Image (spheres, rainbow, N blue to C red):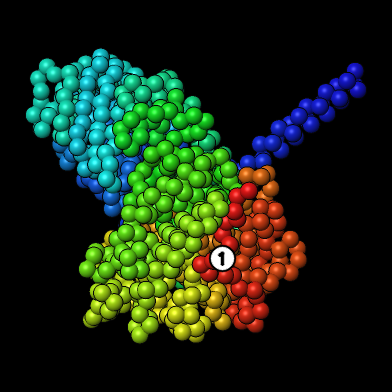
Amino acid sequence: MKFIYSSACLMAMLYFITVNASAQKKKDHAPLVNTFIGTAGSGHSYPGAATPYGMVLLTPVTGTAPDGYLYTDSTIHGFTHAVYADASGIPHSEILFMPTIGAPELSQVKRGASFKKKYEKASVGYYNVTFNNKTEVELTATTRAGLQVYDFPAAPKANVIIDLQYGGNIINSEVEIINDHELRGLRTSGTDGNKRNTYFYAKFSKPFKTYGIALNGALQAGQKKASGTDVKLYVQFDDPGEVAIRTGLSHVSTAGALKNLDAEIPDFDYRKIQKAAKSTWTEELSKMEVTGGAPPVPRVEDAAPATYNPYGRPSPKVVKLPDFAALKQNVFYTAMYHTMLTPNVAGDADGTYITTDNKTAKSEGYTYYDVTPINTFGSRYQLITLTDPKRTVDFIKSYLDGSGNNTNLAFNELIVDATAKGIKGFDADRAYQKLRSSLNALNNEGLKQQGFIQGDKPLSVSKTLFYSYYNWLAAQMAKALNKSLETDEHYKLASSWKNLFNSKTGFFQAKTGNKFQEPFKPVDTVAYERGNAWQYLFMAPHDEEALLEMMGGKDAFEEKLDGFFGTLTEHPVYIEGFTGQYSVAYLYNNFIPYLYAFTDNSQKTQSYINRIINQLYAPEASGLSGNDYNGQISAWYITNSLGFYSVVPGGQYFIGLPQFDKATISLPNGKQFSVVNGGTAITRKNFYLQGMNLDKSGYNKLYLTYSDIAKGDDFEVFTGVMANKLFMQDLEKPTSKQLQTSVSPQK
């Protein structure tokens, strides 16, 4: 019997160890996310409840539309169910609910409820606040539905206000009372050249006693439904205590919203939904693990003890230092969180979605997204293709099947990078034809005729530079598809940027005819979209070495880079945080710190990255220096914290400055790629490269390739407080040439 008992214990122990080891495979980084980062200043972030890439972001709003949520505010006007961006990239939220007590107040100002910050908290997939009037609100969400719990104080009358006017450019709205537990509606808003229909279906846990619908501010007696641009309503309860509301969304129909609701939140089990939301975030955040990042915090007990003081003066207090490593990890995992809030699922649970020409379609074998948020130049494509090829394919299929608009062709960075990495599962020829079709119209604005866009047209310089780059992207796709004539055609147009470079001033300038416009100042903004001549100075990412030669060689190129980072001018009020002319909010110059790789002082890359990360990112509400609605600013932080950055899709990864003792990426092929920088644990001043190893062997290149990463090797850097110019000058430099190999022809 003793043997049997021992065997049973041993089996139990082995089972426990196995289960425990399995549980440890994916660490829970969710507690490191601070959802309030970016909710002050110009960050445009929201602290509400969401799941990764979900249609629903159930969040408080504190200001008048379109201000959304501002951390410094102390009054909440409602809780909205979805967030989207207008043509300027400014986010708006919609489908607003608000709990009130007493007589129903539909006015946004009058219905607001004040609160104290100590009674507000949030985490991934969860938000909670208690108003000064003792009403407590809890929010959680699934992909296509949200669940609110309003715990009203004892009161004769309690209300839920629904405001369909709140949000961005409203075109129409509709609402209908179904019974004393249910209502449904629609909000149509204008976006970037399109209309956005958001349908909703709400179910209440308790019956409401009465209701009222207001159209243009006037209550409609006895009406159960209404439509217009100013529709608000209330439902009222008699001292209800706790009321839960589950609301499904759809961009297809109210029937779709109901199906989504019943599929994802079939009951009012709040904790089950909250737990599931956190679980999905734990899964997504486990794709990367970072440790360390700063010297360890001295233990309080290690501090010098207080000494006897005969003069009666108090001994100095022991001050507990902040844990800078933990704070950096907060910023990192919050950045990961922000990059996964968009693009948003746009199809119903059964795959049904609406195309841009307002037709119903069904996604087969993939999830349909609104990919407009990644239709911008920047860093996000690098993260998506590196860590999530399945979702990469879904995004591309959504783009091809009509999601978003075609006015900004930067989405094709994702397609080119996916092609270069060998990601399959989408129609590459169809993607190329869509890009080529869009480019034909843009190229006819001047690139095909005279090699640039004339200066009498708006934004002539920035358009010429962007169109040149988009043609380079098209050339990569044409090359992959073995279309040699079209490859050459797009390569020729990709060189158009050269025609606007004025060698006398050293800047890109507008031209009238064949003459540069005068007078000219580098801070002029007329011919540049959201920027000036300084900020567009290096906008030839596919051919920087040619730009270097046009500027007069390495020394002149470096001098311009120094001028870029050292020139101070006035900047737009909607952008915060500049290092000279550099701002992470200007996505088209995110790569500029890496251009020092082409000079004899490539160590300046590490210096400026260190400055940007420490000056423009912080673990606080105002810790983002620009609009991060689409996650691009957060994506820049992630890639640069890992220590490598691709200037163009499919290109080499320029080596920067790893920010953590160790950062590990779990790759889709089952391998792990680790970046180690032990210098971060010694002093925060260690930001100059002194040596490198790849797979435990000395490494002498200033770049990595995708194959280096995909192998799952360990990449180790050694850093110090002084620049090691001799080491840096001996490294093999990366390339940036128009004919660089980004993709290989398909076989």
Question: Is any atom of residue 462 visible in this view?
Answer: no
Q: Residue 120, percent across and down?
A: 36, 42
Residue at x 26% of width, y 38% of height: 195
Identify the residue at the far front of this view.
Answer: 485
| Residue at 47% in and 57% down | 486
Vertical placement of 267 versus 447: above or below?
above
Q: Is residue 434 left or right of residue 68?
A: right
All told, the count of numbered labels is: 1
Q: Would you call the spot at circle 1 few (<14 residues within 10 Å), some (14-19), or many (20 or more)?
A: some
Instruction: Answer with the quarter of the image where residue 268 lies.
Output: top left
How far across and down, in percent of the image, does residue 488 sit?
A: 49, 62
Image location (x, y in percent) of residue 728: 62, 77
In this orientation, which residue lies closer to the viewer: 634 or 448?
A: 448
Q: Is residue 41 left or right of residue 654?
A: left
The picture places residue 479, in percent across and down from the top left corner, at 54, 56
Q: Is residue 468 visible?
A: yes
Instruction: Locate residue 517: give its quadrant.
Output: bottom left
- Give the residue drawn at x 39%, y 70%: 497
Of 189 and 286, the residue lying toward us: 189
Q: Is residue 352 left or right of residue 365?
A: left
Q: Residue at x 49, y 75 (%)?
A: 546
Amino acid on which disc 1 is placed: Gln
Kindly identify which residue carries mark 1.
740
- Tag 1, which secondary structure? loop
Nearest the viewer among 8 and 362 is 362
Quarter holding the N terminus is: top right
With respect to residue 273, does 700 lie above or below? below
